[in-house]
């Protein structure tokens, strides 16, 4: 197998927070090869089956490096396992394919309503985050790019018809938001999939897991027709620290939902706690893992905050001690990769300033939770 091939180009359709199609959620279109494709005016399979994508796939097969895939190439050159390898399984021959099929759809097209204002969230991914930043007079400063991926009614109809017309190619629907378990368009879409097709499709949700009911029905009622359903639960701490990071989460309700799922989920459902690591939780990762493991859940540390970069763990002042703490733990290789990056003192100072202003607007207790930061 060559070092540029990746199954994502053959099996994944992804659009980001700005509505731009990319090779996957890790890709950057550095050479603007896909700049003309947006969910605002291009249907998913129109993009996926385009001449531009066919050209990229052919160049991958021939061993040429693709501009948008540089992140994975760089990770591999540094001696780490990239998403190209561990996530898309392209290092295992049986997963290689050279035609499009068994497609995973991951599209940010269902809306951005979310009931939480997580302190590290890209603003356009959460309506509550936008509202909080505007109330604090910080929106223009924090949201420096146009990530508005909203599409009009006609384009929404075109997109859903395009997906349903190619539904025989779809193996997996990865639904994100906003908060997908509270998005009406998401429910309308999955209900439009015929039963005989749904039974062969897997669902996964990126969710804060704070609400499991919609219009009087439980999430199980909406998803039972599908082959398999999994939930990647965005959860970055526990107790009061989780309350601050994912403000204003109701901790009791959140943990009640975890227990309800544990006790009632059918056999073909799965939950995993996905920790997004940032400067506010990087010192406590072992404690976080123990907390949710004791509740019976798998914990994943793949995600780190890179946008905004000033909240990245590379800027933590105790990074040398953190490297020693985590260097022998197999779950922490992505944590270590970020800790090894060069520290930027100006970014750290800005991060503390940002947190201080956000804390003042919330009138909350950051100083009590993280007294070591002297904010």
Image: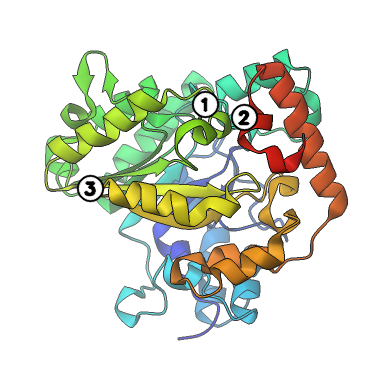
- Residue at 33% x, 60% y: name it: 101
The front one of 88 and 161 is: 88
Q: Name the residue under label 2.
A: 124
User: Where's residue 185, x and y in %?
Assistant: 38, 23
Label 1 vs label 3, nearer the camera: 1
Which residue is denoted by mark 1 in the rendering? 112
Q: Residue under circle 3?
A: 201
Horizontal relation, residue 93 to residue 262: left or right: right
- Lower sequence index among marks 1 and 2: 1
Q: Which residue lies furthest to the bottom in this view?
A: 1
Distance Cα–Cα, label 1 vs label 2: 7 Å
Q: Is residue 165 left or right of residue 32?
A: left
Residue visible at 76% across and 56% down in the picture: 317
Q: Which residue is at 60% across, 43% downward? A: 20
- Does residue 211 show up? yes
- Could you tell which of marks 3 and 2 lies nearer the N-terminus? 2
Q: Kindly check if marks 1 and 2 are in contact, taking CB atoms under 8 A apart as contact.
A: yes
Count of numbered circles in the view = 3
- Percent position (x, y) of residue 246? 53, 31
How many other residues sit within 10 Å of disc 1, few (<14), some (14-19) or many (≥20)?
many
Residue situated furthest right in the rendering: 346
Observer-nearest of 160 and 184: 184
């Amino acid at each position: 197998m060559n070092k540029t091939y990746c199954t994502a180009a053959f099996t994944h359709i992804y659009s980001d927070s700005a509505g731009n199609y990319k090779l996957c959620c890790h890709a950057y279109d550095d050479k603007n090869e896909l700049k003309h494709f947006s969910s605002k005016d291009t249907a998913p399979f129109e993009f996926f089956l385009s001449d531009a994508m066919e050209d990229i796939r052919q160049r991958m097969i021939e061993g040429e490096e693709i501009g948008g895939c540089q992140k994975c190439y760089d990770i591999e050159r540094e001696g780490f396992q990239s998403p190209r390898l561990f996530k898309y399984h392209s290092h295992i021959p049986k997963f290689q394919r050279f035609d499009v099929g068994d497609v995973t759809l991951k599209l940010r097209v269902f809306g951005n309503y979310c009931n939480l204002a997580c302190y590290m969230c890209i603003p356009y991914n959460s309506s509550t985050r936008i509202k909080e930043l505007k109330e604090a007079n910080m929106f223009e400063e924090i949201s420096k790019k146009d990530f508005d991926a909203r599409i009009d009614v006609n384009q929404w109809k075109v997109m859903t018809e395009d997906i349903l017309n190619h539904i025989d190619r779809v193996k997996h629907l990865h639904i994100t938001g906003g908060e997908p378990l509270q998005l009406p368009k998401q429910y309308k879409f999955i209900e439009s999939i015929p039963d005989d097709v749904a039974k062969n499709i897997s669902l996964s949700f990126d969710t804060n897991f704070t609400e499991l009911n919609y219009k009087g029905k439980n999430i199980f009622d909406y998803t039972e027709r599908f082959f398999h359903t999994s939930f990647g639960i965005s959860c970055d701490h526990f107790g009061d620290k989780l309350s601050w990071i994912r403000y204003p989460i109701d901790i009791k309700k959140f943990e009640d939902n975890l227990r309800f799922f544990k006790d009632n989920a059918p056999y073909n459902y799965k939950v995993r706690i996905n920790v997004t690591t940032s400067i506010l939780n990087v010192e406590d990762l072992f404690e976080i893992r123990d907390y949710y493991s004791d509740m019976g859940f798998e914990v994943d540390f793949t995600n780190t905050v890179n946008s905004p970069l000033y909240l990245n763990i590379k800027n933590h002042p105790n990074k040398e001690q953190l490297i020693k703490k985590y260097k022998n733990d197999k779950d922490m290789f992505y944590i270590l990769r970020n800790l090894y990056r060069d520290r930027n003192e100006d970014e750290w100072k800005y991060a503390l300033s940002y947190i201080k202003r956000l804390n003042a607007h919330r009138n909350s207790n950051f100083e009590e939770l993280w007294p070591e930061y002297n904010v």
